[in-house]
Each structure stands twice: as C-alpha cells, then as structure tokens.
Amino acid sequence: MNTFFSIEELKNYAFIVIGSIFLSLSVVGFFAPNELITGGSAGLALLIHYMTNLTIGTIIVLINFPLILIGIKYLGKMFAVRTILTIILISVFIDFLTQIVHVKPFVIDDALGAIFGGIFVGIGLAFTIKGNSTAGGSTILARIISSKTEIKPGQVILVIDFLIIFSSLFILEDTKKVLWSIVSIYITAKIIDIILTGNLNKKVVYLVTQKTQILKEIIREELGPEGTIIKGDGLFDNQEKKMILIVVKVDKLQKLRQIVKKNDPDGFLIITEATEMLGRGH
C-alpha cells in the first residue's frame, strides 16, 4: 500500500494526470474535428471512430485492455498500474469532453490542427513518460515483441505508426489530411525530445589533432567551452594520439571549424548531437 502512495509515486500520478489532460485535449480539440490522426492507440481509435458510432474513449479502452492483460508480465506491476490509470483517464476525459461538456473544436483547419495537435500530444506523452507510464497501445505491443525477438521497441512502434498512417489513406480518402497527420507525428516526436532532454542547441565535437596544446588555448580564449583531452593509441600505427572533446553551441561551430583549419589543416572534426547533458552546470 505504501508503494502506491509514496511521495515519488504521487509525483508520477500528477504527471500522468497532466499528460492525460493534454492528450485528451489534442484529440477533442484538434484531431477529431479535423479528421486527422496521430500515432499509437489514439490514432487507431480515431480511425475506428471515423468508421463507426463508437466513442473514442470506448475504443481506446477496447484496444488497450486486451494488450495489457497479455503484456502485464512484460510491464511490471507498478508500470502496469500506471498504464491502466493513464488509459482510463484519457478515455474518461475524452468522452467527458465530447459527450457531456460538448467542447467545441479549438480550430477547424488541417494545418493548424496537425501542428497544435502534435504539440499537445508531445506535451502529453512527455508528461506521461515523466510519470513512468505509457499511453498504452503500440508501447505495450513493442515491449512484448522486443522481449520475444531481437527487434528494438522503437522499431516496432515505428512500424505500427506507419501501418496506421498507411491505413488512413483508405479510410480518410484525403491525401492532404494524411500528409498533415505525418507532420503532426513528427512534431510530437520533436516536442517529446525537447521536454525530456532539453532544447540544448549544442553539438559534441571530437577534435583529433597533433597540436593539442595550441588548439586548446585558442579554443579556450575564443570560444570558452570546457572540454577534455583524451589520450589513446592509433588503430594502425599504435602511436599515442590525443583528442579534444568539447561541447559547443551551434552558432559557434563555424568559428571552431575556422580555428582548426587555420591552426592545424591536418586535424579533423567529428560532430554529433548533444541530446542530453547532466551534471555540473547542467
């Protein structure tokens, strides 16, 4: 009993409630009025809703609960409890807003509906993830399949979303709506990344050079980032080599290129995304 009502678990419930509200508003205010779709079980529920008289909330429950019963051993007890809570909240909120409150559409426009619907779904899913839960559907199926095969969960979710989008071509019979739905799913993914990892706008740079000391001083003076000098051996000649590892803002990347080109034409850069930074100063 204490596990269900610990401070940490209450925080999870708060995140789940906030996430469920945003997810419900995205469906009621943006997707359903414009006959657009999103990914996961909500997208499948919308497609079925467009073909039947069933309410969206009812369909979400019908889709998800068989999956939960099948996949509960893959989710873990507490994760399953949170997922069930999330699904119930989303279903109740959607049907309450549409069947009882009769909330009017926030906008009747494919483009605006897709953009803002995607933003709301992204916010909702990010809060749900922060609450150590899931909105069900494809995530549950992905866990089951990945536990039985070598396929990664992300790949399963991608395939499911693709199948939902592909199916919508035959149901919506409007290519423009389908394309805007794809845009919406992309926006959702970006919003989730921003909320969960932060909009860092930074790059990780690995600078391989023989002029470590010279470049270290110039970079420190002109760019000011903190960094690390990594020592290692060459793969083929087995000679000791040094590499500078730094994190720089995107707008300083060109300046770094110029510094390296001017001071060590033989040096080269490996540049990757800084998706998340933790620890001192971050």
Image (cartoon, grey):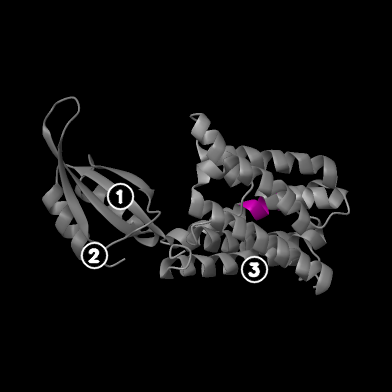
Q: Nearer the viewer, mark 3 or mark 2?
A: 3
Per the model, the C-alpha gap separating discs 3 and 2 is 43 Å
Q: Quadrant of the C terminus?
A: bottom left
> Where is residue 89 shown, x and y percent of the image?
66, 64
Label annotation for residue 21:
3
Q: Secondary structure at mark 1?
A: strand
Residue 61 as seen in the image, left or right of residue 219: right
Q: Amino acid at mark 1?
A: Val
Q: Residue at x 74, y 49 (%)?
A: 62
> Where is residue 128 shown, x and y percent of the image?
55, 60
Q: Does the magenta run of residues contain 184?
A: yes
> Where is residue 272 shown, x and y percent of the image?
37, 47
Q: Nearer the viewer, mark 3 or mark 1?
A: 3
Q: Amino acid at mark 2?
A: Gly
- Tell me if mark 1 has few (under 14), some (14-19) or many (20+) residues whose alpha carbon lies within 10 angstroms of its own: many
Q: Residue at x 26, y 54 (%)?
A: 246
Task: Name the image quarter holding residue 168.
Answer: top right
Q: Which segment is the magenta one?
A: 181-185
Q: Secondary structure at mark 3?
A: helix
Q: Residue at x 33, y 51 (%)?
A: 204
Which residue was labeled with disc 2?
Answer: 224
Residue 127 as seen in the image, left or right of residue 68: left
Q: Does the magenta run of residues contain 251?
A: no
Residue 90 as seen in the image, left or right of residue 202: right
Per the model, the C-alpha gap separating discs 2 and 1 is 14 Å
Q: Nearer the viewer, residue 256 or 134?
A: 134
Q: Residue furthest front?
A: 1
Judged by its main secondary structure, the magenta piece is: helix
Image marks 2 and 1: residues in contact by CB distance under 8 Å: no
Residue 127 vertical position relative to residue 151 in the rendered view, above or below: below
Q: Residue at x 61, y 40 (%)?
A: 70
Which residue was labeled with disc 1?
Answer: 205
